[in-house]
Amino acid sequence: MNKRLVKSYRIQNSHFPLNRRRRWIGHRTHRDLPVSTYQLSYRSSPVAFVEAMLIVADEPIPIRRLAQFLRIRSMPIIQAIVDQYKKMLLQTNSVYFLDVCQDRLKLYTRPDFLPWISRYLKSMVDPRLTPSMYEVLAIVAHRQPIIRAEIENVRGSQSGDLLRQLLEKGLIRIVGRQESLGRPVEYGLAKKGLEFFGFNRIEELLAAFNSSTPTTP
């Protein structure tokens, strides 16, 4: 990387305060950048912006999209920032680790914390769910795939608005259409819905239902 490219980067991204006495790239490659480069004005540095976006992102972020957000046109420079952030996480023994797969970035908590995180998630109760929404969600979980008419038959009341709200929250999803008159929509649990009940796979949920169902003599 030549000095002209680095200088151009500084001009185009002047809203990121950089220490004039230090070179972003200098004569070294991006793999040799010291951590101290980013310790100055960290909150307004590109690394801080990368971390903030990765924390709030639900899906892996492509590196090119990250470069667009930061207004960086040079892929070597954005790669240097990503590599430096990954290095910082390791050196500071952070609870996070950065996963890079097919030029997509995703921030995860380290596996060491899985028991505590799982215990916390299982104890969480979403205050935005009304008792009626809990009821519909439980019916969908137990009898999926299920159509609206079957849900309303179990509850004895209209459920269209409740289904819409659960869809918006990402707890249920449309899994298909029933081969009957009018081909009504069939509902099932979404991944977020499975996690809400403390399961990772639908097989685990069904096994839990079967084990808790009393058998008739």
Image (cartoon, rainbow, N blue to C red):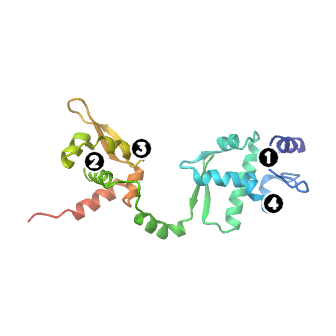
Mark 1 and mark 4 lie on one chain; the one further toward the N terminus is: 1
Amino acid type of the residue that numbered disc 1 sits on in the rendered structure: His
Residue 2 x %, y %: 88, 44
Q: Which residue is mark 4?
A: 40
Can I make out residue 200 in this image?
no
Check the image and report above or below for 85 versus 8. below
Q: Which residue is label 3 attached to?
A: 168
Is residue 54 found left or right of 85 in the rendered image?
A: left
From the top left corner, tell me how far across and down residue 4 is, in percent.
Answer: 89, 41
**Which of pointers 3 and 4 lies earlier in the amino acid sequence?**
4
Q: Three-letter amino acid code at disc 3?
A: Glu
- The image quadrant that residue 7 belongs to is top right
Which dot, 1 or 4, sits closer to the camera?
1
- Asked if labels 4 and 1 touch by Cβ distance under 8 angstroms, the answer is no
Label 2: few (<14), some (14–19) or many (≥20) C-alpha neighbours in 10 Å: some
Q: Which mark is residue 144?
A: 2
Whole-percent x, y for residue 182 in the image = 23, 29
Amino acid at circle 4:
Leu
Q: Secondary structure at mark 1?
A: loop
Disc ID at residue 15: 1
SS class, disc 3: helix
Type of residue at label 2? Gln
Give the structural element (helix, strand or loop) at label 2.
loop
Q: Earlier in the sequence, mark 1 or mark 2?
A: 1
Q: In the displayed structure, would residue 180 be above or below residue 48?
A: above
Taking the image as shown, residue 26 lies to the left or right of residue 180, namely right
- Cα distance in 3D space between marks 1 and 2: 52 Å
Query: Sequence order check: which comes first, mark 3 or mark 1?
Result: 1
Q: Nearer the viewer, mark 3 or mark 4?
A: 3
Q: Position of residue 96 (x, y in %)?
A: 61, 62
Identify the image quadrant of the N terminus: top right
Circle 1 crowding by C-alpha within 10 Å: few under 14, some 14–19, many from 20: few
